[in-house]
């Protein structure tokens, strides 16, 4: 029997955290679960992008079935390529997980200098996301604390998707002026998207959801992060908060330990939501973001490849640490919930949270 | 003909220039090495390739990151383009070969490209199948190439599921080949479970791991 001791709904748990109150238990709010939800419902991953109404149906069903916070989105890590004029391939194969870039909008220095900001109303996935957002607003399930979710990427990540990772890496050192040019465009684009969402849907009960994998220390040094990622992330977040958004959710993807002191300088809102990968210790995240809610961080490969018992045990262990986060904690996968993760492993995370996630005292 | 001291100076210069990602100096010193009669093979193995060993160490120690490896490799390849045509074929030393690819469903090539750089710098022949490689191609190409090592990688949790199937298909064509796997979602335990003979956590240690794996596979065969 699930959640016997529960006295709050998922939305109430998140609202309690926003109000700096302790919820009855740790909420479960997975990062990027659309692929899993689609396969679970018998759809394909490509249908997320071809038939977004099916994605909304599948994401809501999965969130109810597995008892987690719902935040329907149609996000993808390659965001930026298509939007700036590149070409994507949809995930249609047995082993595909997400859209992949087949042509970058910028392949030469000349391309970079002639690149312009795309028309925000027509660029790439944006019209599809607007339609998706309108559909989201037609119902208000109890496990959906934020109904307006504006998905963007951090400028460094978008810049990597505009010109390709290797090219960006070379330009950071050999042609920094080109890297800065792309980063300016990426910052302006994300800021325009946030502005566009605010105009259409308002900023009340709205969440900005962002991510950055390309700036991880698996790719760049903290020194390059400080020079090329930090200033643009700060500028973007300041602009977003000026628009009127109160909360920014950032998935700091991958091995980012050396970048954490810099990420800590980026305003995340009051409070922000900081989601970290399994490579980052939850308590280290809490130390660097004492005023933000921490999300994380079971290794998705373990969810996919380990036993039910191991997933359950590890989830409990992570929650025990997470409960000590000063400004609140939400259990989540450390990155995308693997689309082909076994259902019983996914349920094991919920069970473990319901068994071990209750708080005994109030803040 | 450069004397020993001058030769050592030029080789050190080449190493330093690669490590400091200075492509122009590598080109100049490669030309100079040829002009002064430094053996092109020594310039490559003791200069350029040794430098990449150091670059690999710096990467493993988190002093260098992807941009630094890419620029060091640009410098390496600039030197190789000048020196390689002048290498006289040496008999005796057997050149190892690697068949390399990213499994279907995955277009992430940065890790695979870094691995390729490290093997080429160590003097291996690399047959790069690219990214999003249909699984049967791994087996078919190995049947043709007879590489010493097959390297297979994946970055996504979904595409990693293709690795055991790719290994099966390679082994069906060549049961004795040593298979090395890598990629962010993998670890040594999973690599073993998938049937791989070796696992490399990062490009900095990949050549050493491949050599150790070849030894292990050789010893295993002896015991059978």
Image (cartoon, coloured by chain):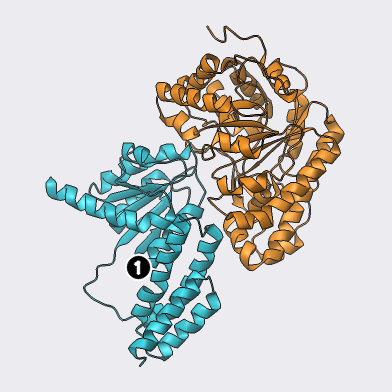
Chain colours: A orange, B cyan
Q: Residue A27 sits in which quadrant? A: top right
How packed mark 1 is, by other alpha carbons closer than 10 Å (few <14, some 14-19, many 20 or more), is some
Q: Position of residue B30 (x, y in %)?
A: 45, 82
Q: Position of residue B19 (x, y in %)?
A: 48, 70
Compared to residue A77, the image places residue A84 above or below, namely: below
Query: Is residue A105 among what the camera can see?
Result: no
Secondary structure of the residue carrying numbered label 1: loop
Q: Position of residue A355 (x, y in %)?
A: 52, 14
Q: Position of residue A103 (x, y in %)?
A: 62, 53
Q: Residue at x 43, y 55 (%)?
A: B203
Q: Residue at x 57, y 34 (%)?
A: A283
Relative to A72, A217 lies left or right: left
Q: Residue at x 68, y 60 (%)?
A: A179
Compared to residue A35, the image places residue A168 above or below, namely: below
Query: Is residue B101 among what the camera can see?
Result: yes
Kindly identify which residue carries mark 1. Answer: B123
> In which quadrant is the N terminus of chain B drawn?
bottom left
Q: Residue A250 sits in which quadrant? A: top right
């Amino acid at each position: 029997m699930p959640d016997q001791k529960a006295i709050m709904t998922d939305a109430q748990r998140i609202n309690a955290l926003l109000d700096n109150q302790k919820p009855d238990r740790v909420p479960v709010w997975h990062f990027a679960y659309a692929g899993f939800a689609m396969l679970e419902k018998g759809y394909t991953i490509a249908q997320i992008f071809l038939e977004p109404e099916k994605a909304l149906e599948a994401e809501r069903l999965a969130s109810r079935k597995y008892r987690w916070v719902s935040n329907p989105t149609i996000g993808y890590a390659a965001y930026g390529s298509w939007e700036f004029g590149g070409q994507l391939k949809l995930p249609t194969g047995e082993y595909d997980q997400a859209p992949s870039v087949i042509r970058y909008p910028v392949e030469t220095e000349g391309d970079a200098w002639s690149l312009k900001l795309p028309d925000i109303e027509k660029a790439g996935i944006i019209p599809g996301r607007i339609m998706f957002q309108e559909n989201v607003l037609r119902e208000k399930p109890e496990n959906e604390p934020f109904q307006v979710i504006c998905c963007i990427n951090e400028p460094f990540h978008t810049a990597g998707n505009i010109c390709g990772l290797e090219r960006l890496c070379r330009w950071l050192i050999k042609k920094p002026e080109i890297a800065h040019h792309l980063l300016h465009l990426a910052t302006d684009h994300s800021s325009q998207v946030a502005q566009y969402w605010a105009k259409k849907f308002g900023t009340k009960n709205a969440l900005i959801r962002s991510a950055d994998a390309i700036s991880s220390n698996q790719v760049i040094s903290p020194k390059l992060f400080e020079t090329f990622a930090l200033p643009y992330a700060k500028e973007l977040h300041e602009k977003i908060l000026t628009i009127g958004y109160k909360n920014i959710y950032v998935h700091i993807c991958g091995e980012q330990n050396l970048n954490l002191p810099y990420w800590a300088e980026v305003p995340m809102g009051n409070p922000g939501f900081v989601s970290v990968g399994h490579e980052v210790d939850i308590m280290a995240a809490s130390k660097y973001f004492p005023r933000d809610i921490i999300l994380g961080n079971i290794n998705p490969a373990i969810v996919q490849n380990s036993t039910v018992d191991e997933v359950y045990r590890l989830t409990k262990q992570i929650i025990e640490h997470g409960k000590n986060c000063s400004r609140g904690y939400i259990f989540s996968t450390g990155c995308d919930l693997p689309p082909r993760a076994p259902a019983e492993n996914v349920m094991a995370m919920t069970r473990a949270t319901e068994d071990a996630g209750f708080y005994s005292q109030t803040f | 003909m450069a004397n020993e001291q001058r030769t050592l100076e030029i080789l050190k210069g080449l190493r330093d220039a690669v490590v400091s990602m200075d492509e122009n100096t590598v080109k100049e010193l490669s030309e100079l090495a040829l002009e002064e009669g430094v053996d092109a093979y020594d310039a490559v193995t003791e200069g350029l390739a040794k430098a990449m060993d150091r670059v690999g160490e710096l990467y493993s120690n988190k002093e260098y990151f992807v941009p630094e490896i890419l620029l060091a490799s640009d410098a390496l390849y600039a030197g190789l383009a000048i020196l390689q045509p002048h290498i006289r074929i040496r008999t005796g030393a057997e050149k190892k070969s690697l068949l390399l690819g990213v499994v279907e469903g995955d277009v992430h090539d940065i890790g695979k490209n870094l691995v390729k750089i490290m093997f080429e710098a160590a003097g291996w022949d690399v047959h790069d199948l690219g990214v999003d490689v249909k699984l049967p191609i791994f087996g078919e190409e190995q049947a043709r190439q007879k590489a010493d090592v097959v390297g297979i990688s994946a970055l996504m949790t979904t595409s990693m599921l293709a690795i055991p199937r790719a290994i099966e298909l390679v082994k069906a064509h060549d049961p004795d080949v040593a298979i090395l796997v890598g990629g962010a979602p993998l670890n040594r335990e999973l690599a073993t479970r998938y049937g791989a003979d070796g696992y490399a956590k990062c490009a900095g240690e990949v050549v050493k791991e491949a050599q150790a794996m070849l030894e292990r596979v050789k010893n295993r065969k002896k015991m059978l």
